[in-house]
Amino acid sequence: MSDFDAIILGGGAAGLMCAAIAGQRGRRVLLLEKAEKPGKKILISGGGRCNFTNIGAGPENYLSANPHFAKSALARYTARDFLDLVEKHGIAWHEKTLGQLFCNGSARQIVEMLLAECDAAVDSGGDVSVRCEQEVRAVSRGEDGTFTVTTQDSAFTAPALVIATGGPSIPKMGASDFAYRIARQFGLKIVEPRPALVPLTLGGDEVLFRELSGVATETVTTAGKGSFREASLFTHRGLSGPAILQASSYWQAGEPISVTFLPDRPAGWLLEAKRETPRATLRGLLREAMPQRLADVLTEQLGVHGDLGNAPDKALRAAEEKLANWRFHPNGTEGYAKAEVTAGGISTAELSSRTMKAKRVPGLYAIGEAVDVTGWLGGYNFQWAWASGVAAGEAL
C-alpha cells in the first residue's frame, strides 16, 4: 500500500493550493518543500503584501504556445473565488491600479491561510503533511504505476505525483530547473524557458540612456503583440519599470521595442504649439511633461533647438513621430536573477487543460509556473497558480 494518495513537489502557491483542495477531498497528501518554510515567493511578493490576484484575470492576460490552454482552469476558479477565500479568513485587502489586489497587512497572511486550508483536510477525512527542508534525490515510477520520491530523509510512495516546483526565476530564493528535469525524465516536452517580467539591458549607442538611472515616466511600451501603458524606468543597465517588465515577456532577442513618450498628446501637437507659442522650445515643453533629465536627453537626441517658431515643420513632425515611436534595441535581459517569472516550461500539449494531468504518464501532474503558461505583471501569475492548483487538486 502506498504511503500517500499523492505527493506534491513544491510548497509554493500552486503546490499549497493543490494540497489543500486534494486534502479536503479526503486524500492523504504529502507536500515536499526544499526550503526551510513553505511559500517563500509568496512572502516577498508585492513588496511583502502579496499581489495575490487580479480581479480582471482572463486567458488574454497569459502567454503560452497554446493560448487556449489556460481557459478551462481560469474559468472554473476565478479571481472572485480566491477573493472569497481571502475574505473567509478575515484578511483585509485593497485594490491598486489595473485591478491588482493586495493584502492590507502582510503576505504572511496568505501563506497562513493556505496552511490553514491544508489543516482543514482532517475535517473531510483527509490529511496534508507539509515537510520542509526536503531535498529530492530521485523520483521513479514502478511497473505498477506507483511513484517513489527519495529525499535525504526517506523514500515515499504514492499513485500520483504533482510537479509544482516552479521555474528558474529568482534563483536566490532556491528556484531551479528541477521541474523540467523531472518532466524530461518522464518524456514530457519542454517549451524553451526564458526569463519573463524582466528588466532589459541597453548597449551600443543607447548606453547614454543609462545616465538617466532612477528616472521614470509614463509610456506606452510595445514588444511583439504586447502593448502596455504604465511607468518605464531607466536603470544603470537599461530599462525597467512595469511597462518594460510587461513588454519583456513578449520581446524576442534581436527585436526592438517601441516606447511612446507623452502618450496623451494628439497627432500634430508640436505644430500646434509652434503656431500658438512660437517662442516656446521643445526642451521647455518636454520638461513640463516629464522629468527634466529625460527631457534634456530626448531634446539632444531629437536635435530640435531654439524657438519652435524658427524650426521647420518637417523637423517638428519628425520629432513628434520619434517621440511617439522611440525604438530601443535591447541587447539582452537581466536574466533569471531579476526575472519575476519564467516563460515557457512543461508543454501544455502534454497536459489535460481540465485536470493538469500528463496525457501519456498516468498519475503525473504539473501545475503553476512549471507549466508553459505565463501571466502579466499584477497578480495574474498567482491566479494561474491558484486555478491550476485547484484543477489538479480536484482531479487527484
Image: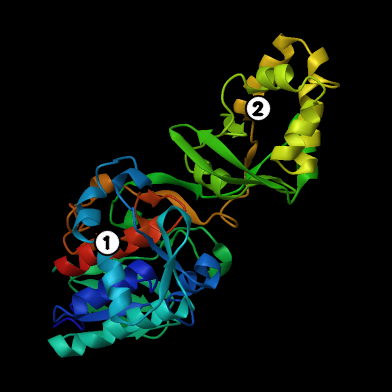
Q: Quadrant of the C terminus?
A: bottom left
Residue shown at 65% from the left, 36% from the top: 331
Tell me whether the residue at label 2 lies in contact with that at label 1, contact meaning CB atoms closer than 8 angstroms: no
Q: Quadrant of residue 361?
A: bottom left
Crowding near pointer 1: few (<14 within 10 Å), some, many (20+)?
many
Q: Quadrant of residue 171?
A: bottom right
In primary-sequence order, the first of circles 2 and 1 is: 2
Report the residue marked by disc 1.
387
Instruction: Check disc 2 and give the amino acid type.
Output: Leu
Residue shown at 27% from the left, 61% from the top: 387
Q: Is residue 167 above or below residue 104?
A: above
Q: Is residue 366 above or below residue 144?
A: above
Q: Residue 195 got which mark?
A: none
User: What secondary structure is found at the residue carrying circle 2?
Assistant: helix
User: What secondary structure is found at the residue carrying circle 1?
Assistant: helix
Report the residue marked by disc 2.
323
Q: Quadrant of the N terminus?
A: bottom left
Q: Is residue 381 visible?
A: yes
Instruction: Check disc 1 and give the amino acid type.
Output: Ala
Question: Residue 271 at what x, y percent from top left?
Answer: 68, 17
Q: Which sits in the foreground, 19 or 363?
A: 19
Question: Residue 299 at what x, y percent from top left?
Answer: 79, 28
Question: Residue 197 at what x, y percent from top left?
Answer: 51, 50
Q: Is residue 119 above or below residue 54?
A: below
| Left or right: 292 as drawn, with respect to 32 | right
